Amino acid sequence: MMRGAARRMSSEAMTLDLTPMIDVVFLLLIFFVLNIKFKTLEGRLDTFLPKDRGHQGFVAREQHQDIAVRLTRRETGTRVVIAGTDLGELPPGWTRQDRPIPTGQSIRSEVLARAHARIRALHQTDPQSPAVITVDPRVPNGDVVAVVNECIRADVMKIAFAGAAAPPSGK
């Protein structure tokens, strides 16, 4: 009896129903296609500009006069020029840390005091004006930091640096 039942089962074709698996695969495919996020290009801005007007709606941006500070190196020191006014020279080595400073005295020079007064006066005429410092590559870092400190003391918080032309070669 057993032999007959086993023969009938082996002779019948075993079928696997793939319909539910195909349905699930298609549902997953549709889910991932609908939820894909494409990479947007950097710098692309979607704008909605009016098409009925031309340049009449253009508003000019307010221009601020820069506080131009120029530091150049000479053999006698660092020349400080602010907005075309020559304020003098910082002597070489005035920021050295190895010399003693008497108690109650400052190493701030008169040139820096004049620079502070000039920067403050220019900043009071236009409080939004930035200080643009052009520095000769041969100027010591201590002189640059001292001028930046004077800008900060004069409440100028927008400070930018402009590159100076390379000094001429001695050929």
Image (cartoon, helix red, strand yellow):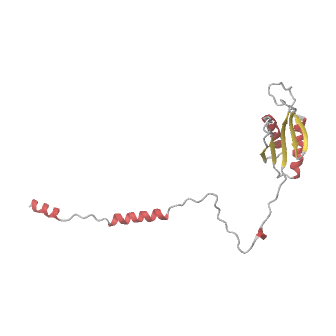
Q: In which quarter of the image is residue 16?
A: bottom left
Q: Which residue is drawn at 86% across and 52% down?
A: 126
Say if 167 sits above or below 95 in the image.
Answer: below
Q: Which residue is drawn at 37% across and 66% down?
A: 23
**Percent position (x, y) of residue 19?**
33, 67
Q: How many marks are shown on the rendered structure?
A: 0
**Percent position (x, y) of residue 93?**
83, 29
Q: In which quarter of the image is residue 50?
A: bottom right
Say if 64 sits above or below 160 in the image.
Answer: below
Which quadrant does the N terminus fall into?
bottom left
Is 171 on the left or on the right of 114, as rendered?
left
Please identify the residue farthest to the bottom as the structure is shown: 52
Which quadrant does the C terminus fall into?
top right
**Percent position (x, y) of residue 53?**
74, 73
Is 170 on the left or on the right of 15, as rendered?
right
Which is nearer the eye, 54 or 57? 54
Please identify the residue farthest to the front as the structure is shown: 171
**Percent position (x, y) of residue 67?**
85, 48
Q: Which residue is drawn at 79% across and 60% down?
A: 61
Which is nearer the eye, 65 or 10? 65
